[in-house]
Amino acid sequence: MESGGAITVLFERETTRILEFARRGFSVRVIGAPGSGRTTVARKVVDHLENRGANVYSIFAMRSLKGFPFAGLDSLDLGQRHRASGIVGLSDVLSGLLAQQGPRFIVVDGIENLDSETLAVIEVARERTQRPIIMTMSDIPFSSTPLLGLDCWPGIAVPLQPLRYEQVEAVSAEILGAPADDDVVARVFSWSGGNPRLVARIIESAVLSERLTLRDGSWHINGNTLMNEHLHGTVEGLLYGLDRDERTALRTIAITGSWRLDHRTTIGADVLDRLEHRGLLAVDAGSNGAVTASVFPPLIADCLRNQARGSRARSPVDDFSPAQGTEAAIGSLSKKYSREDQTRVVTPGTAVQGLTKREAEVALLAGDLDNREIASRLGVSIRTVENHITNARRKTRTDTREGLSHHVHRAARSRSSESPQEARD
């Protein structure tokens, strides 16, 4: 089984948009979370450009080489003798190549993982030649000094969205060679949070571990879960780069199921904020006003819980000591995530189909607004919105955003038409 073809097809629209912008001379920023398909898109763009006769200078950056000067330029083969003259000499060489006749492009996958010297060379060459640069980058805000030149590079942003239910269904059928039943698709969709890498890996590892069985022309779950030992390495890849406090906090929240963000918490607000920015937490304000965080995607939470069973005898909270200023910082974080919005939609039908209040609010808006607009309106992160839509669609068994919104609106109208006595009953 090979998932590459199935996943690649999903990015045709994004690739076409990127190529159109690049041909018109615009630089492009492809933005996505880890596992969102950024590298797949970058490779497709390079292949398309080269097949059309363009000269492409491509760099696929690695986090492990970020600390080595000029490591990012190794794939461009600019010549060792020019390294002696440093940034100036290498900039001259790259500028000379880019200035030649014909269509020429720079493609950098994972630009946040480039060493500063390579970034400086690219910045000088781009400024001299005005050639477009196509870069992929994380949707995580940079925690340190902004990358050299990145903020001043003009570019059009192309965000990579999580897979929708029907896309997960199509990928499942492509990988398995036959349709998967609704239970399999719903579990994969919910468990992965729409992350393409996780979707493919969950399906492939489930077959490898005999968690799926082909029966009557479709694939069914063989047992009670898709969890298997092959998924732990995939999860570790998503957690790469977390420090000790972040890993311990994530494990703590996974074990407890959700973590209330109040003044009694022993996890530092800065740790929670970094995890939320990384897309590993979904933050929600419950109907009782309490603000809680849960691990996202759910697969990560389940893997962390499985790892913790039998490996720890004491409370995971023991790994923490209260950080200086925790009370004030947590208060600020709670206020940030629970601020009221006067435009928020609340109807008598918000508690339908077992949805939480926030899931219903998101569902009501999903038919008219995209995830970024919903996040802005409700004062939560885009990841949190994605998580709510995933859960709401699973609970209501709807396949599209529009179907979900219509379902909840219809339930709201039904509830509002009930008499007070009927509503109480």
Image: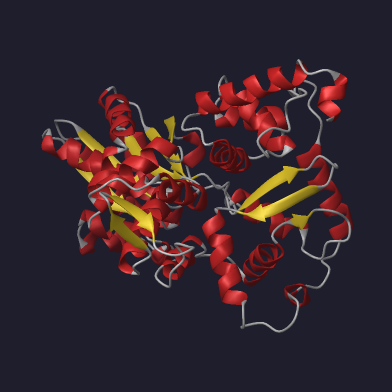
Displayed quadrant of residue 124: top left
Q: In x, y percent, where is residue 346?
A: 76, 24
Left-right relation of 132 to 360: left
Check the image and report above or below for 129 versus 307. above
Nearest to the observer: residue 278 or residue 324: 278
Q: In x, y percent, where is residue 54?
A: 15, 35
Q: Which residue appears at 72% of the width and 74% of the height?
A: 316
Nearest to the observer: residue 183 or residue 379: 183
Left-right relation of 36 to 53: right
Residue 317 appears anywhere in the view? yes
> Farthest top residue?
417
Q: In x, y percent, where is residue 402?
A: 51, 23
Displayed quadrant of residue 96: top left
Q: Quadrant of the C terminus?
A: top right
Q: Which residue appears at 22% of the width and 50% of the height?
A: 177
Q: Quadrant of the N terminus?
A: bottom left
Q: Which residue appears at 74% of the width and 36% of the height?
A: 357
